């Protein structure tokens, strides 16, 4: 299949842009065990903030983007205060509620274009920006996960009561995770706004939040590489398989159920792909081959 | 005053629809302790079953109605077997159940779009369209019918839960699954029964919904309202689900009528958030122990 | 770990690009030429999207049977946008960059038509939107978008036509509006209906909203009933029209109902029957026109379903593109775009004369249709003053 670079560039950018909210959600759901159905709301906050800063205040792209992330984080502080004390199921429904509520508010907010959308956003996103931001995002995320905070998050995911007993401030840990996921979401939203030049509240509806969750699950809960690879696969693959458009979502549904039943660890399986890991894999294969050789040599006993 | 009464009637009518949807959902939650997001899909299938039974097979309404319910019940059990049972056997964290449910829901909605197509279907008029007039108030016949049918179904359900042996078994399993197994209750069988009942109710709700409005693949999205109603009334409590639904319908309609209609959904979500902050267990919910 | 993650990403992207570009050779120039189509094949708008895609396919099949376009066979490349603007952008990037189409038909929604303009400009391929009625599709900040065109009239025109007809012909003094706040088409029509109606001296006594997907309108309708309007403007799509009109009648509302081009459909009559009897709406064409009837019958035979309004506009859009290619006598999209700017043809939705500065059909007649005995009866052509 002969792919035009223009088209490929577009898909890669799109995958790269979506990768960031996915990474944020991977931290929240994969590492901290909080299942959010409303992270698309943070994308929309970031997107609209970035657009506002660029169009109305004339602020250049990167600062606007950062502002988008910051405002989204503030949103998370507020929403988190209300919802993070709730148990799993309730948290899901609450985030779903907030996600939809924000979208409804934006639909009615005519200053930002309401449901008809906001056109004319300057197009500043290009492939280099996306790749650079992606790399920075992954590095920061990796550092967070390796840090004490990251370990706290995993502890909370595994055994909330026990974590509390050993002195981890569960609420603060959850809030940190939530805020970071919001920041990532906001950046993703801002990049998207400047990629399309157009924003509409329904781009960030429940469907989008659901898509993000599906990618995180597919890639594997508790794995950054999973988030990266999940985004690349689940965004690029459907593009290439456009002819099956009608059945795309049907297949998504089946795949999700299948993963839960057969391989809940997702594609990567909770581990990270590292060069050391690949090296060890080769060593293991080499050792096995050597053992086979040895036994055949001694064979024929 | 008439305005208020009319809006009240509107609200009660919507509330009874929510109630029938919310009850099945709450029932499953009480046993399995997770939100069955696929419930909406079963409701939608119920609406389609009814439609085809009536138009294609020309069955009389009562027969089609019950048949749709039964088919929906079977569908619900099939879903449980395929998408949830393997997870239960593995004692998977509840997160997985929700994800699996979500997958089922996406599958159900889109399989209809991909095969039958997304065109709206209308039920042939079963009940007269002329409303009943009481003074200046108008009450649709279908609404009255829906209210009555919902009441009957719910009454039957309450009878089942509170007064029969199976009902007691269900209550026991909901309270503590392990202990009930020790008492000789076949938990697996109870789960199947619960899903079947929930499915039947969903199917019936679907038919009523299709009759009153129309049939289309995205009906499942309306069930978010019933989730809110169930949470509002207290997840796991049947009576709570009913009361929550009626209240939600009325509050939504009154706020929409007196305040602003375009914010109706927002009000529903605000209610949800309010309840989650103030009294997360809902109006009639049981305070459960912490899932440690 | 950090360095390794970094290395991983870079290698990942490289491998992917290598893998994808590496396989397969180049395509040779063949005797087919490609035309693209985008719209909702799945999602809420799937009914209309599928109708459009069927229609375009039908027109192109006919074209191919009769010798093709400038000697070459035409291949239709349809992509699903799921009703989403982002998907539309991806689809158009693929159509222009990958499939190398000479022109694109669709989409049917402004929310998809607006974001694709930058891609069209970059790749210099024209697009003809079918029912995207937001003015911003072709003109933003006073400047026309060089590669966007449309074949329908725009919101301002439709809303104004409805208001004008209500005031001038139906002699309505008070009007109420029920609209969909989550739909740009509905918001657009509402805005311009209100403007024209009040300019003419009428009064808007109630303005209530609902959200797409709502099925129960009795709360806002009860409020509207209290305000006692002569007409109620319902600028949205037939599914919600059927439901809201039925509920309105159930509540005892006797006012005349009016709407826009989102109304007409066989389904509306079968769903709402008596509720919409005696209602008016603004449409693009007269359904009983013999040429129109011929197309309707053909569609029904081919696909077994009734054709929706989108079908008529998709039909005209496709023919508009074909006409432009013939006049440009070339498959170069830039030349085709220039030819599109001077389009002057008659389609089944009326005269299509494209304005060079607006890329919209200028002075397209609006047809006022009344529903009598369950039939769509053409009343008159109405032009906005």
Image: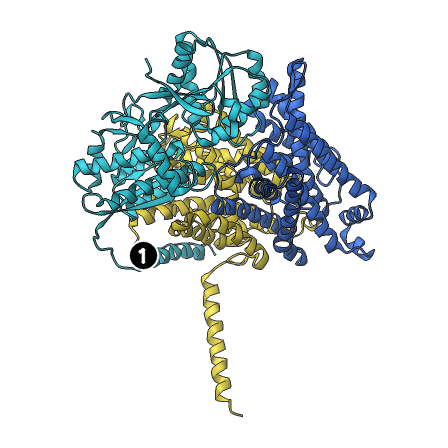
Tell me where residue A191 appears, x and y as whole percent.
40, 39
Chain whose colour in the figure is cyan: C
Where is mark 1, residue-wise?
Answer: A1
B9 over B77 or under it: above or below:
above
Q: Is residue B189 left or right of residue A262?
A: right
Q: Along the line of sight, which residue is nearer the eye, A179 or A125? A: A125
Secondary structure of residue under mark 1: loop
Among the 4 quarters of the image, the one containing residue A50? top left
Chain ID, mark 1: A
Q: Nearer the viewer, residue A218 or A147?
A: A218
Q: Which chain is yellow?
A: A
Judge by depth and name the residue closer to the eye, A232 or B77.
B77
Residue A272 picture location, percent across and down: 50, 58
Can you say whether C242 is above or below C231 in the image? below
Q: State whether residue C86 appears in this view.
A: no
Q: Position of residue C105 (x, y in %)?
A: 31, 38
Q: Horizontal placement of B6 versus A124: left or right?
A: right
Describe residue A296's horizontal placement relative to residue B139 as left or right. Answer: left
Using the rendered view, name the quadrant where residue C325 is placed.
Answer: top left
Inspect this view and state whether residue B160 appears. yes
Residue C21 lies, in percent from the top left, at 31, 56
- The image quadrant of residue C42 is top left
Q: Which chain is blue?
A: B
In the image, residue C150 above or below residue A268: above
């Amino acid at each position: 299949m002969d792919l035009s670079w223009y088209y490929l560039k577009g898909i890669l950018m799109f995958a790269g842009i979506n990768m960031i909210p996915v990474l944020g959600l991977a931290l929240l759901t994969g590492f901290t065990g909080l299942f959010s159905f409303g992270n698309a709301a943070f994308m929309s906050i970031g997107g609209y903030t970035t657009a506002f800063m660029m169009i109305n205040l004339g602020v250049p792209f990167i600062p606007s983007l950062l502002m988008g992330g910051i405002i989204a984080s503030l949103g998370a502080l507020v929403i988190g205060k209300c919802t993070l004390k709730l148990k799993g199921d309730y948290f899901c429904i609450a985030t779903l509620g907030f996600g939809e509520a924000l979208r409804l508010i934006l639909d009615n907010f005519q200053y930002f274009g309401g449901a008809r959308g906001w056109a004319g956003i300057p197009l500043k996103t290009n492939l280099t920006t996306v790749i650079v931001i992606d790399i920075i995002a992954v590095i920061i995320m990796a550092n967070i996960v390796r840090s004490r905070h990251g370990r706290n998050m995993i502890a909370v995911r595994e055994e909330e009561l026990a974590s509390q007993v050993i002195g981890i401030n569960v609420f603060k840990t959850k809030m940190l995770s939530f805020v970071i996921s919001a920041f990532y979401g906001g950046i993703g939203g801002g990049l998207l706004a400047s990629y399309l030049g157009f924003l509409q509240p329904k781009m960030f509806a429940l469907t989008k939040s659901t898509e993000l969750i599906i990618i995180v699950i597919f890639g594997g809960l508790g794995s950054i590489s999973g988030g990266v690879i999940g985004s690349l696969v689940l965004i690029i693959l459907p593009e290439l398989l456009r002819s099956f458009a009608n059945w795309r979502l049907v297949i998504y549904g089946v795949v999700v159920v299948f993963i839960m039943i057969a391989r809940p660890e997702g594609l990567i399986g909770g581990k990270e792909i590292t060069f050391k890991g690949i090296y060890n894999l080769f060593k293991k294969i080499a050792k096995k081959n050597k053992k086979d050789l040895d036994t055949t040599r001694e064979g024929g006993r | 005053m008439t305005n208020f009464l009319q809006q009240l009637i509107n609200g009660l009518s919507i509330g009874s629809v929510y109630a029938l949807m919310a009850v099945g959902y709450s029932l499953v939650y009480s046993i399995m302790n997770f939100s069955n997001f696929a419930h909406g899909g079963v409701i939608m299938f119920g609406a389609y079953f009814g439609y085809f039974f009536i138009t294609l097979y020309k069955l009389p309404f009562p027969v089609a109605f019950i048949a749709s319910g039964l088919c929906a019940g079977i569908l619900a059990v099939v879903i449980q077997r395929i998408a949830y049972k393997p997870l239960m056997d593995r004692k998977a964290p509840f997160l997985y159940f929700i994800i699996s449910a979500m997958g089922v829901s996406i599958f159900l909605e889109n399989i209809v779009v991909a095969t039958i197509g997304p065109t709206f279907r209308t039920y042939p008029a079963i009940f007269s369209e002329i409303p009943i007039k009481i003074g200046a108030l108008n009450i649709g016949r279908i609404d009255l019918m829906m209210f009555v049918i919902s009441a009957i179904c719910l009454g039957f359900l309450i009878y089942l839960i509170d007064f029969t042996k199976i009902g007691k078994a269900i209550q026991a399993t909901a309270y503590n699954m392990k202990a009930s197994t020790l008492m000789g209750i076949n938990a697996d069988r109870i789960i199947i029964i619960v899903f079947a009942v929930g499915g039947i109710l969903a199917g019936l709700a679907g038919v009523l919904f299709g009759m009153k409005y129309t049939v289309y693949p995205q009906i499942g999205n309306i069930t978010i309202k019933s989730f809110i109603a169930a949470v509002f009334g207290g997840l796991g409590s049947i009576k709570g689900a009913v009361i929550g639904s009626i209240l939600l319908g009325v509050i939504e309609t009154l706020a929409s009528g007196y305040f602003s209609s375009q914010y109706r959904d927002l009000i529903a979500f605000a209610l949800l958030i309010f309840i989650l902050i103030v009294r997360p267990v809902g109006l009639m919910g049981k305070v459960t122990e912490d899932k440690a | 770990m950090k360095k390794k993650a970094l290395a991983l990403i870079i290698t990942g992207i490289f491998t992917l690009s290598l893998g994808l570009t590496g396989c397969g050779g180049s395509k040779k120039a063949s005797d087919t030429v490609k035309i693209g189509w985008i719209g909702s094949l799945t999602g809420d708008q799937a009914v209309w999207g599928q109708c459009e895609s069927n229609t375009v396919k039908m027109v192109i099949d006919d074209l191919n049977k009769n010798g093709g376009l400038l000697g070459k066979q035409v291949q239709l490349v349809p992509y699903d946008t799921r009703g989403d603007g982002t998907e539309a952008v991806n689809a158009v990037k693929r159509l222009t960059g990958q499939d190398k189409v000479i022109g694109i038909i669709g989409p049917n929604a402004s929310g998809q038509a607006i974001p694709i303009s930058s891609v069209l400009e970059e790749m210099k391929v024209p697009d003809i939107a079918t029912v995207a009625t937001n003015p911003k599709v072709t003109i933003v900040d006073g400047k026309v978008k060089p590669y966007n065109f449309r074949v329908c009239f725009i919101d301002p025109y439709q809303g104004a036509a409805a208001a004008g007809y209500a005031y001038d012909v139906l002699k309505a003094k008070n009007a109420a509006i029920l609209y969909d706040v989550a739909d740009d088409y509905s918001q657009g029509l509402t805005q311009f209906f209100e403007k024209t109606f009040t300019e003419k001296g009428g009064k808007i006594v109630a303005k209530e909203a609902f959200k797409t997907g709502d099925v129960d309108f009795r709360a806002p309708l009860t409020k509207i009933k209290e305000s006692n309007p002569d007409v109620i403007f319902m600028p949205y799509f037939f599914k919600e029209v059927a439901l809201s009109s039925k509920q309105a009648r159930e509540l005892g509302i006797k006012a005349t109902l009016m709407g826009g081009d989102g109304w007409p459909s066989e389904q509306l009559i079968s769903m709402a029957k008596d509720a919409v009897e005696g209602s008016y709406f603004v449409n693009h064409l007269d359904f009983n026109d013999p040429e129109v009837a011929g197309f309707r019958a053909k569609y029904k035979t081919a696909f077994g379903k009734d054709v929706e309004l989108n079908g008529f506009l998709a039909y005209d859009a496709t023919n508009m593109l074909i006409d432009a290619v013939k006049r440009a006598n070339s498959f170069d999209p830039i030349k085709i775009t220039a030819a599109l700017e001077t389009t002057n043809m008659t389609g089944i939705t009326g005269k299509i004369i494209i304005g060079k500065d607006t890329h919209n059909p200028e002075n397209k007649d609006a047809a006022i249709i009344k529903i009598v005995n369950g039939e769509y009866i053409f009343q008159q052509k109405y032009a906005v003053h």
